[in-house]
Structure formats: C-alpha cells, structure tokens
Image (tube, rainbow, N blue to C red):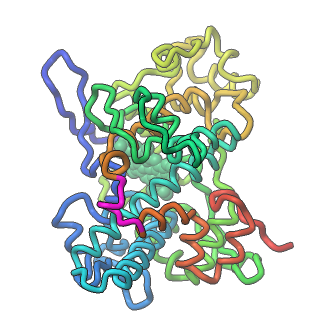
Amino acid sequence: MTLRRTVKETWGTSRPATYTNINTHWWDLSQVYGSDEAVHTTLRSGVDGKMIVAADGLLPVGPDGLDVTGFNDNWWAGLSLMHNIWTKEHNLVCDMFKKSNPTWIDQEIFDHARLVTTALNAKIHTVEWTPALLADDILQTAMDANWYGIAPAWLRNIPDIFSQQIAEVWYGIVGGQPDFSGVAFAHSEEFVSVYRMHSLLRDNITIRSHVDGQYTANSYNISEYTFRGAQSVIRGNKFSDVVYTFGTDNPGALILGNYPAEMMSLNKPGAPYILDMAAVDVLRDRERGVPRYNKFRRLFSLIPAQTMDDISDDPASVAALRAIYGDDVESVDLLTGGLAESPRATGFAFSNTQFQAFILAASRRLMTDRFFTTDYTAEFYTQEGLDYISNSDFRAVIGRNVPELNASVYTVDNAFKPWVVPS
Ligand code: HEM
C-alpha cells in the first residue's frame, strides 16, 4: 500500500514534530459549524440565526454527494445522522431565543444558539457518551463531577478558597477557572491514537422500523454506508428509522480480530490508492512518534508488560500477538496492545492503557476553554440558555428533533445504551 506522509510542523530541532489539524481543536462543534468564517457563512441561512436545511428538514447535499456541513471528510451514515440532529437542534434553540428576544438580529440569535448547542453537545459527550463506553459507577460519578462538581446544592455557595484542583472537583470544571497546566491546549497525538476506534464500526447496518422494531430489507455494508453512500441510508429510509437503528444496535467490540473487513480495503473517493485502514492506524502512530504499548504504559506510570502473557489473559490474543511480534514485548504497537489488553474493568469498552490518555484529554478539553470556564455565565449564554443545557440530555435532544422516537429513546437511562426493542 502506498500512503502519503502526514504534513509535519517542526519547531526547531530540539522539540518533537507536531502535525497541524485542519479543524480547530476546541470543543466548538466546528464539525457542524465549520472551522472558519468562510465555511460557516455558507452554512447559515441568514434568517433568525438558523443553519440551512433542505426542504425535507435534513442537511442539503453538495455536488460531491456529501452533506453540506462544517466538516465532511471520512463521511458515513453515522456522522450524517449526528450532524443532522445537531443542526436541527441548533435551529430549535434559535426558535427559543427568537421567541424570548424578539428584537435580536440574526447574528445575535446565531451566536447564542451556537454557544448553547455546543455546550449541550459537550455536556452530553462528558456525562453520557463517555460513561456509556466506560459503563462504571465510579466513572459516571467522575464524569458528572467534571461537569457539575460534587458539592451538594446547599453547599455550593461557600466562598471559593480552594486550590484549582480541589475547586475543579468541588464545583466542577464548568464555570470555574481555566487550567492549562502550563501548556497551550491542543489534542495530543496520544489522544488521537487511543481514539482510533474503527473496530466500533459494524460490517453491516440493517435498518429497523421504529414502529415495530422489525428489520426492513434495507441493509448496507461499509462500502455502501460510507462517503456518498451515507445518503442512500439517510434519505433512502425514514430518518426516524435510521436514528432508531443506531439507537438499538450495539457497536462492534474494541478487541483484537474485530477490525471491519471492508475497512481494510477502503476506497476513499479522491484517494489515489485503496486504504488498508488497520495498517494505516498502526503506521500513523509509528510515523508520528507515538510510543509503542509498553513505553506508553511506562510514560503513564503504568506497570509495563514483561512478557506477552502480561498483556492479555486470553490465550488466543497472546498467540496472535506472538505470531506478529514474537516474544519482543517492547515492539507491540499501542493500538494492537490496547485491543488485546485484558482483563478490563467491568463495563469498559477499551483498555486501561487507552483510558489513561482518554480521561486526561476528557477533562482538559473543558478546562482550557473560556466558554466552559470563566465565560460559562448568563452574560454569555443567557440564563435561559444555561437552564436549557442543564435540563437537556441526549434523549431530550432526540425526542424533540425526531418526535416519533420520544417513547423508544426513553426506554433507557442513557441514549447511548442500546434502546429496548419491543419483543
Ligand atoms: C465508516 C466510517 C469511517 C471511515 C470511512 C473512516 C476513515 C478514516 C480515514 C480515511 C482516516 C485517515 C487515515 C490516514 O491517516 O490516512 C481516519 C482516521 C481516524 N479515524 Fe476514522 N473512519 C471512520 C470512522 C471512525 C470512527 C467511528 C472513529 C472513532 C470513534 C474514528 C477515529 C479515527 C481517528 C482517531 C483517526 C485519526 C485521525 C488523525 O490522524 O488525526 N474513525 N478514519
């Protein structure tokens, strides 16, 4: 396989190379709004703060066959679904602000709606998506603490005399002081590496009817639901059925030997070669200097593996590792070691090794953003906006944007857990 190198930024000879992203690193929903003024202007209707949607209420489709949105690289039906929901949600928030602030112009409504929608998205990611992937009571408490803090309501008003770290836990990160830990914010390459979760993708998506939970005849393999194919899923079915299908299906397991076969011969439009994404995932980490599994563990103060048997208690996984790396435990790649690692904490979809980088970045992306810290106030969001964020979870977002699913989405306490299908 031929593969282009990543474009490198070098900062003098003494510092490791970095790789510049073409999108903002901030948790600013730029995937929906665009990362720069030029893109996001093309996505706005110019009326009442709203984003452009087509006559059927879904995102318009561009000449390339992809949804017109902030960022549509590596497009697939799951992303189309999410971008549609969040664009709809933005427009609903605009309706709310228009009603309570009839004199606001388009820009004022847009700015406030963007802040509220973005913070709601960040909250849902923090207290719902992460704990669904890492289904553990302590983790849920920790993620809730990130957003809300641990202080009971009646003790929240005591003067803030705490150190930064204690205040972050007591009052929550959100609404507190920013904390850069002395380093400018960017997502680390290690965070990108532990997010290489292509095994979550299903080989095949079969659409279910939300009316009776039964499968329809519409079935899509990866080559059919990716890139331009996303449209056949989204517009070839009722939107409510597509959302219902994603709500009721489990994702693929993040374990060795479960890489979706079609991702290993991915035909990305415009790419001059067929991509073996499993190889690319490993190769990119090597190219960008991300430490291998054992070194990564040492750097995170975790006990390194002495032999292959220390990585996994599953004999088949150990045999698979030995087949590739022999007994050279230091050469095991981060992704491979992470997928093989067991036992795992109960409810954890991924390994403890990945978890270390994940949890650090989960807090840091909140701590470093003024809109989640000092400026998370009624002055910027309005009290109505703050209340809207507080009172919403992803079930509410789905329920108000796809009302046909109001009953189904409330069969679970977290919309990212598989919804109950009627028997
Ligand atoms: C069918 C859906 C998907 C397609 C077609 C796809 C495709 C790709 C491609 C082509 C790349 C860039 C490869 C390169 O470095 O040259 C990539 C990178 C990546 N993908 Fe996916 N992907 C999909 C879904 C996902 C999912 C579900 C996740 C995680 C939940 C994910 C996480 C990542 C990460 C973390 C990277 C590395 C980004 C970077 O280097 O900055 N992808 N994907």
Is residue 260 visible from the viewing direction of this image? Answer: no
Residue 199 x %, y %: 58, 46
In this view, 293 is above or below 209: above
287 above or below 41? Answer: above
Which residue shows up at 39% across the image and 73% down it? 90
Residue at the bottom extreme, as displayed = 55
Q: Nearer the viewer, residue 115 or 376?
A: 376
Residue 406 lies, in percent from the top left, at 66, 77
Quadrant of the snapshot with the N terminus:
top left
Segment tinted magenta in the rendering: 376-383
The image quarter in which residue 161 lies? top left
Residue 268 screen position, x and y as percent: 38, 58
Q: Outermost residue, left direction?
A: 12
Dominant secondary-structure state across the stretch colored magenta: helix
Total numbered labels: 0
Q: What residue is shown at x 65% (from left), y 72% (from top)? A: 244
Q: Position of residue 140 (x, y in %)?
A: 64, 43
Does 75 sit above or below residue 27?
below
Q: Is residue 73 visible?
A: yes
Q: Is residue 145 left or right of residue 286?
A: right
Classify residue 313 as left or right of residue 144.
Answer: right
The quadrant of the image that shows the C terminus is: bottom right
In the picture, measured across the screen, residue 226 lies left or right of residue 268, that is: right
Residue plotted at (30% across, 65% down): 33
Q: Quadrant of residue 28?
A: bottom left
Q: Residue furthest right?
A: 423
Name the residue at the top extreme: 306
Examine the image and state in which quarter residue 383 appears: bottom left
What residue is rendered at 63% in x and 38% in y? 139
Taking the magenta stretch, the answer to whether it contains residue 94 is no
